[in-house]
Amino acid sequence: MISEWKTFLQKAGAEFDDTGVASFGNPPRELSVAITGGTIADLSHYGLISVHGEDAADFLQGQLTNDVRKVDPGHSQLSGLCNPKGRLLATFRLFRHGDSYYLCLPAEMIDSVIARLRMFVLHSRVTLEEASDTFVHLGLSGKDPQTVLEACSGQLPAEIGEVTSGDSQVVVRVPGIHPSYELFTTPEQAEALWAKLNVRSAPVGAEAWRLLDIQAGIPVIYPQTREAFVPQMINLQLVDGVSFKKGCYTGQEIVARMQYLGKLKRRMYRARVAASTPPRPADAVYCSGDPDQSCGQLVSVASHPDGDYALLVVAQINRAEGADSLHLAEPDGPPLRLEAPPYPFPHD
């Protein structure tokens, strides 16, 4: 994290953990206001990888699940990186600023993704670097932040994935239950915006922002779930994170075969669970109809203001949409309560 920005946040009441801002002193209230009102969050628990050089676009086109040719200064996209078996090594938002592409993903994924991509550079004129301290990274959600951000930054991107930018600032419209934006800017601009937003919006920690991503059904790959899912299992194609027309990339044959020739047996659902210990990504899920083996895994977890946990969970479709009950960690573990999906599922 940029040192002067961290100092500013400390003076603003931020409490830190190993990954970034844990909270601003009242986690239950922060979770509640994230669902009901306007929030501003430091997103330093996410990091950036910069990719630049003459061959950067062609290089990324041969590695990522989405069509990099559609990423320009006005458009970002969700995308993924697969192994040759079509299993996801990472998910991220890809945007462009200046002469660089940026991959935005959990900070703990940075090193492994850079190492993986460097395996394929060969003679390409491409440079890969960690760039997490290039910008202050903020998340804004709600109508109040939208009004203030527009007053400070000018016209905002209207559609999900669209981008507006200037010399030292990038604003991306992202999915959310409220109007939501991610802002990449300088410490000076971030401090000025924070001061204006703090009057009518609540500062929140990383857990509250994770909750908003779960409510929006946005999948995130963490180290625990690396190589656990093909893109369709986590609904990446339903949030415009996969192109089936772009041509070859690592793992493309498996992903395309699943789309056109196979039958999807697992997909991602939104759920809630009351558990005595916090669930974690990759925790197993069991179903009542077949207790001898797991039928799914957790993708993302966040505390919910009602006192339980919000989840994204990959589960067998016939179990999740049938008469079976789903349980966390053990066949007789806490029951999962499936919630309405945030976007429509295709008819199988």
Image (tube, rainbow, N blue to C red):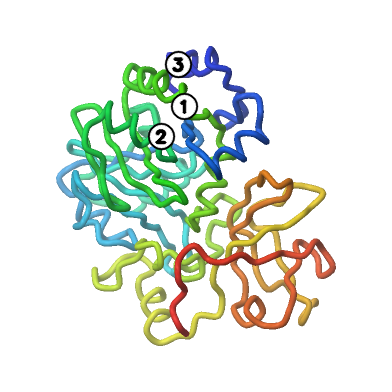
Q: Nearer the viewer, residue 75 or 144?
A: 144
Specify the amino acid type for callout 1.
Arg
Considering only order in the chain, which callout, 3 or 1, is on the residue closer to the N terminus? 3
Crowding near pointer 1: few (<14 within 10 Å), some, many (20+)?
A: few
**Secondary structure beneath label 3:** helix
**Secondary structure beneath label 2:** helix
What number is the disc on residue 3? 3
Residue beneath label 2, please? 144
Query: Taking 116 as reference, is 47 above or below it?
Result: above
Q: Do the residues labelled 1 and 2 touch (CB within 8 Å)?
A: yes
Crowding near pointer 3: few (<14 within 10 Å), some, many (20+)?
A: few
Q: Position of residue 49 (x, y in %)?
A: 36, 40
Q: In which quarter of the image is residue 226?
A: bottom right
Residue occupying image coordinates x 45% and y 83%:
347
How far apart are the two marked residues, 1 and 3, measured between alpha carbons?
26 Å
Considering only order in the chain, which callout, 3 or 2, is on the residue closer to the N terminus? 3
- On the picture, is 167 further left or further right than 265? left
Specify the amino acid type for callout 3.
Ser
Crowding near pointer 2: few (<14 within 10 Å), some, many (20+)?
A: some
Q: Where is residue 297 in the image (x, y as percent from the top left)?
A: 64, 64
Q: Is residue 121 visible?
A: no
Q: Where is residue 123 in the image (x, y as percent from the top left)?
A: 22, 50
Query: Taking 52 as reference, is 25 above or below it?
Result: above
Q: Do the residues labelled 1 and 3 touch (CB within 8 Å)?
A: no
**Secondary structure beneath label 1:** loop
How far apart are the two marked residues, 1 and 2, measured between alpha carbons?
7 Å
Residue occupying image coordinates x 46% and y 27%:
200
Considering only order in the chain, which callout, 2 or 1, is on the residue closer to the N terminus? 2
Specify the amino acid type for callout 2.
Asp
- On the picture, is 111 further left or further right than 22? left
What number is the disc on residue 200? 1
